[in-house]
Every structure is written in structure tokens, then in C-alpha cells.
């Protein structure tokens, strides 16, 4: 269980985390979203006990967290993490010896599945393969909480798909809390269950992907027709081009299609852009 109670982190005149409140009571795959500078990495470092909060309280599994009391069972992997320059096979064997409960079979299965060369040294791997190996090592241990900060940087589309498969298979075999920070929203949504959105250092929203699918949609048509239809709905953004409008709605589906009015599913990326930006763009 994770709980942030009124947590702030200030660097000089910059407030990176601002009175953050969040409760994660159970295992799950969580997607962490936020614009650049929103506080995602700071949130993860606070949770891992790498940095101290300026104010507030962080509790993990009943224990208060700080750099002097780093949480057991929390594994934080940054996008630029590095490993010793050993062969891939040696890195896996070493991890298995040092980490109690390390799932050696899972690690080897993933290495084979993603065509990692067991005989190559770490520095001989491409950037993407280095990241994939680091992620495999993190997911193969028995940490109860895994924090992955932008783990797919440097991945092509195929590797990102492989990463999502790896993430899902790991969670199925070892259910726990896995929080993934990423900008590739619609791709990660295929495997994650819940969404955490950070804006200006605070939690803007924590909700299930299914709830967003049920309530997020786009209504398009002539502006003079659309405006009265959405007047009582929670409109999170609009775009207009001449007399045509697209309204982005996050509410119960009380609008029905009619002549000249289209209702479409809103992508998770569009939902994020509008819930965070909330801009009305007139062209």
C-alpha cells in the first residue's frame, strides 16, 4: 500500500511536488502521465526514498519513508540506469545470487524472447537493448513495488510492443504494484489498468482505464448545434474550425448521434491533452 499525505518537495524557488495526496491500496499496473516538469520523476524518487520530502508524509506498507528509512521492496529504475560491463548471462546470474527470490527462469525466458545476446557485454548492447535488459532484471526480482521512469526511450515500435508484453507477463506471474511513467499513452493503455495524472506537482486524477473508456468521447458537428447539446456536460476541451466544432466530453453518455452530429471514442492521448490543457482552440 502506498499513501502520500500532503507531500511537497521544493528545490530552492521551484516546487516540484505540491501538496500531493494519493492512495494506492492494491496491486495493479499503473500508468503515470504528466507533461514535462509536472513532477513524475520527483514523485518516483520520493516514493523510493531517494530524496526527502520538504513537507508531508509518505507511507509504504505501513512504514514512513525518507532517505534515512528507505522502503524495502521498492525498485526504482530510471531511463538512464546502467549495469556493470559484464556478459548478459553473468549479469542475470549475479542478480540471481544477490537477490533473494529472483526469478531466473523468467529472466532467461524474456532474454530469449527479445533476442538479447547472452554472450554480449553490457556496453556492446544498443541503447534499447540495455534498457530492455535493465527492465528484465528489475521485473525478475521480487520487489513489491516497481517504478519504471520512461522505460521505452530509444525503443522502436516493435520493441515497445515487446516491452508491453514483458510488462504484462511479469505482472501476471508476480502481481504487485508496477508504476510506469511514459509519454506513449495509447500504447501503454493496452496493458495498464489504472491511470495517474500529475499536473503542476499535484495529482490531477487517479482512475481506471475502463472508466475513461466509458465516459470520454468526442462530439462533432456544427457549433450552433453542438453548443446547446453539451451545455450541461463536463466539456474538457473544444476545437473549432469555422462553423464546425469538436467537443471533448468526460461525462455520462447523454448525447445521441443525430443528423450532422458524430460521436466518437476519445483516444487516451486526446483525453490526456484535454484534461491537462483544457484549451479551447479556435481556428
Image (cartoon, helix red, strand yellow):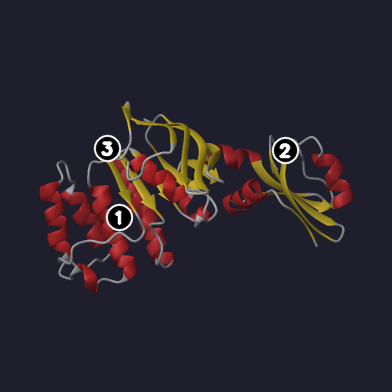
Q: Residue under circle 1?
A: 135
**Mark 1 to mark 2: distance in Å?**
39 Å
Taking the spot 33% from the left edge, 42% from the top edge, the residue there is 48
| Disc sitting over residue 68 in the figure | 3
- As drawn, is 152 to the left or to the right of 99? right
- N-terminal label among 1 and 2: 1
Q: Which residue is outermost to the left?
A: 97
Q: Which residue is outermost to the bottom?
A: 124
Displayed quadrant of residue 65: top left
**Mark 1 to mark 3: distance in Å?**
26 Å
| Disc sitting over residue 234 in the figure | 2
Nearest to the observer: residue 29 or residue 115: 29
- Residue 190 seen by the camera: no
Q: Position of residue 267 (x, y in %)?
A: 60, 52
**Mark 3 to mark 2: distance in Å?**
45 Å
Mark 3 or 2: the one toward you: 3
- As drawn, is 240 to the left or to the right of 91? right
User: Which SS class for mark 2?
Assistant: loop
Q: Position of residue 15 (x, y in %)?
A: 52, 46
- N-terminal label among 3 and 2: 3
- Residue 139 seen by the camera: yes
Residue 158's place in the image compared with 139, above or below, is below
Taking the spot 67% from the left edge, 45% from the top edge, the residue there is 217
Taking the spot 26% from the left edge, 71% from the top edge, the residue there is 125
Q: Which residue is outermost to the front?
A: 12
Taking the spot 23% from the left edge, 60% from the top edge, the residue there is 111
User: Which SS class for mark 1?
Assistant: helix
- As drawn, is 269 to the left or to the right of 231? left
User: Which SS class for mark 3?
Assistant: loop
Amino acid at each position: 500500500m502506498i499513501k502520500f499525505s500532503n507531500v511537497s518537495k521544493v528545490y530552492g524557488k521551484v516546487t516540484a511536488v505540491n501538496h500531493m495526496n494519493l492512495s494506492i491500496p492494491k496491486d495493479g499496473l499503473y500508468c503515470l502521465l504528466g507533461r514535462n516538469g509536472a513532477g513524475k520523476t520527483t514523485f518516483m524518487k520520493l516514493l523510493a526514498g531517494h530524496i526527502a520530502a520538504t513537507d508531508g508524509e509518505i507511507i509504504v506498507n505501513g512504514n514512513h519513508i525518507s532517505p534515512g528509512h528507505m522502503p524495502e521492496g521498492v525498485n526504482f529504475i530510471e531511463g538512464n540506469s546502467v549495469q556493470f560491463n559484464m556478459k548478459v548471462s553473468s549479469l542475470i546470474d549475479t542478480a540471481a545470487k544477490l537477490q533473494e527470490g529472483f526469478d531466473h527462469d523468467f529472466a532467461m525466458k524474456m532474454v530469449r524472447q527479445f533476442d538479447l545476446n547472452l554472450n554480449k557485454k553490457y556496453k556492446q548492447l544498443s541503447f534499447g537493448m540495455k534498457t530492455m535488459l535493465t527492465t528484465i532484471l528489475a521485473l525478475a526480482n521480487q520487489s513489491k513495488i516497481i517504478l519504471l521512469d520512461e522505460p521505452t526511450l530509444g525503443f522502436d515500435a516493435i520493441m515497445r510492443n515487446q516491452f508491453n508484453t514483458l510488462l504484462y507477463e511479469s505482472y501476471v506471474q508476480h502481481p504487485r504494484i508496477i508504476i510506469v511513467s511514459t509519454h506513449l499513452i495509447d500504447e501503454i493503455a493496452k496493458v495498464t489498468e489504472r491511470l495517474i495524472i500529475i499536473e503542476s506537482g499535484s495529482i490531477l486524477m487517479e482512475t481506471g482505464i475502463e472508466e475513461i473508456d466509458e465516459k470520454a468521447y468526442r462530439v462533432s458537428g456544427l457549433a450552433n448545434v453542438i453548443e446547446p447539446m453539451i451545455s450541461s456536460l463536463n466539456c474538457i476541451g473544444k476545437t473549432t474550425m469555422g462553423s464546425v466544432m469538436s467537443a471533448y466530453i468526460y461525462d455520462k453518455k447523454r448525447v445521441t448521434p443525430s443528423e450532422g452530429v458524430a460521436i466518437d471514442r476519445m483516444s487516451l492521448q486526446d483525453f490526456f491533452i484535454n484534461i491537462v490543457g483544457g484549451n479551447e482552440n479556435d481556428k
